[in-house]
Amino acid sequence: QPCHPTETVAELNHSYQKQNLPVTDGSRELHSLCAQLEFLLQFDLKEKRSFFGQRKDYWDFLCQGLARYRQEHKGILFVTSLDKLKTPVGRGRAFLRYCLVHRQLAESLQLCLLDPESLCEWYYARSPFLCPQRRAEILGSLYELDCVTFHLALPLCPL
């Protein structure tokens, strides 16, 4: 059974409210949350390859899902402008951090999870994203982060 970020989100919220300070890169809960999100996004992900044979990862899933509903997601544009990010996993991590800073994580992920056909195209049956109840629980907990301020180091965009 894959992890569930609800407890980590609750800890992060509690810590944020108790300290009344933005969450920074030094936060243990932040590192735990990012690892859990990455695990969930990679859990039971079908192996897909690009035209040139490069393995696709959750970054590609996020790009495809967001392209369906938004012309240009600023997080995708930001990450694709960063030349030093060479792997899909690195781009995915940068995107998650961007979304946390801009309070867009839950909404962005929800847009990617709206289309059942796309989910089945990208994930095998054990993925929690294919279970409506698990998907709702995960998204519900992520929406709780919209009231948390994150001050995270993001790579600089080239000018």
Image (tube, rainbow, N blue to C red):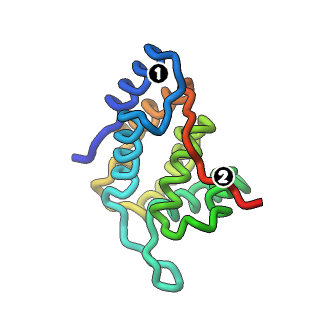
Furthest residue in direction top, as rendered = 18
Give x and y (percent) for residue 89. Answer: 45, 62
Q: Nearer the viewer, residue 114 or 24?
A: 24
Give x and y (percent) for residue 155. Answer: 60, 53
Relative side of 6 to 88, left or right: left
Q: Nearer the viewer, residue 49 or 83?
A: 83
Residue to which mark 2 is pinned: 69
The quadrant of the rendering that contains the C terminus is bottom right
Q: Residue at x 37, y 33 (%)?
A: 29
Residue to which mark 1 is pinned: 16
Q: Nearer the viewer, residue 112 or 120?
A: 112
- Dot 1, crowdedness within 10 Å: few (<14), some or many (≥20)? some
Dot 2 and dot 1 residues touching (CB under 8 Å): no
Which one is closest to the eye, mark 2 or mark 1? 1
Name which quarter of the figure residue 43 lies in: bottom left
Residue 63, above or below 99: below
**Hey, what amino acid is under mark 2?**
Tyr
Q: Nearer the viewer, residue 34 or 138?
A: 34
Q: Residue at x 49, y 66 (%)?
A: 88
Name which quarter of the figure residue 67 lies in: bottom right
- Which label belongs to residue 129? none
User: How far, Cα to Cα, is label 2 from label 1?
Assistant: 32 Å
Which numbered disc, 2 or 1, marks the residue that appears first in the sequence?
1
**Hey, what amino acid is under mark 1?**
Tyr
Give x and y (percent) for residue 1. Answer: 21, 46
Q: Secondary structure at mark 2?
A: helix
Relative side of 95 to 81, left or right: left
